[in-house]
């Protein structure tokens, strides 16, 4: 009765409730893709807004300075108004780029933003 028994217990590895390693890498790649697309589309959108906003203001100012005295002046105003419309559509397109990128990053629905962006792009091409 004086004998001691040794009990051998095998070491068990903790089982994690997380996904396997290949799915974990896919999640990390997806997050990286989402961050990169957010950065790229935000920069494109900022470029659209920062380039077209001052030009739109300058054209608006030039429209106001032209007197409506002859047909050539009216035609010049009409051409500049068309360009102003195209610049305004381009500015809104840049804002939609930024808004759509943020929605894509947050895993929101982007169908409406994409549709509105396509419509504004078509208006820009028509102008």
Image: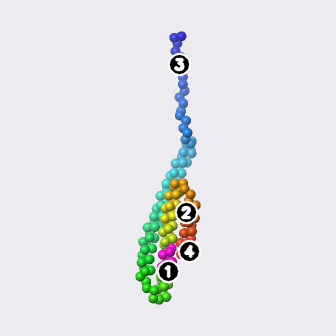
**How far across and down, in percent of the image, does residue 75 sit?**
50, 84
The tag earlier along the polypeptide, 4 or 1, is 1
Q: Which residue is mark 2?
A: 113
The mark lying in front, picked from 2 and 4, is: 2
Q: CA distance from mark 2 to mark 4?
A: 20 Å
The local secondary structure at tag 3 comes to loop
The local secondary structure at tag 2 comes to helix
Q: Residue at x 45, y 73 (%)?
A: 56
The local secondary structure at tag 4 comes to helix
| Type of colouring | rainbow
Q: CA distance from mark 2 to mark 1?
A: 29 Å
The tag earlier along the polypeptide, 2 or 3, is 3
The mark lying in front, picked from 1 and 3, is: 1
Q: Is residue 85 magenta?
A: yes
Q: CA distance from mark 1 to mark 3?
A: 96 Å
53 relative to 7 in the view: left or right? left
Q: Is residue 104 magenta?
A: no
Q: Residue at x 54, y 51 (%)?
A: 30
The local secondary structure at tag 1 comes to helix
The tag earlier along the polypeptide, 2 or 1, is 1
Q: Which residue is mark 1?
A: 79
Q: CA distance from mark 2 to mark 3?
A: 69 Å
The tag earlier along the polypeptide, 2 or 4, is 2
Mark 4 neighbour class, 10 Å CA radius: few under 14, some 14 to 19, many 20 or more? few
Mark 1 neighbour class, 10 Å CA radius: few under 14, some 14 to 19, many 20 or more? some
Q: Main secondary structure of the magenta part?
A: helix
Q: Could you say which disc has been placed on residue 6 in the image?
A: 3
Q: CA distance from mark 4 to mark 1?
A: 13 Å
Q: Which residue is mark 4?
A: 126
Q: Residue at x 58, y 61 (%)?
A: 111
Q: Is the Cβ of the residue at disc 4 closer than 8 Å to that at disc 3?
A: no
Q: Which residues are magenta?
A: 80-86
């Amino acid at each position: 009765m004086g004998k001691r028994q040794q009990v051998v217990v095998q070491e068990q590895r903790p089982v994690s409730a997380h996904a396997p390693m290949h799915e974990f890498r896919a999640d990390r790649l997806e997050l990286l893709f989402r961050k990169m697309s957010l950065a790229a589309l935000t920069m494109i959108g900022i470029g659209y807004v920062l380039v077209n906003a001052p030009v739109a203001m300058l054209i608006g100012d030039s429209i106001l300075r032209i007197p409506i005295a002859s047909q050539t002046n009216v035609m010049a105003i009409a051409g500049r108004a068309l360009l102003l419309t195209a610049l305004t559509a381009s500015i809104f397109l840049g804002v939609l780029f930024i808004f759509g990128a943020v929605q894509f990053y947050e895993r929101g629905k982007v169908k409406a933003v994409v549709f509105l962006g396509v419509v504004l792009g078509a208006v820009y091409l028509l102008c």
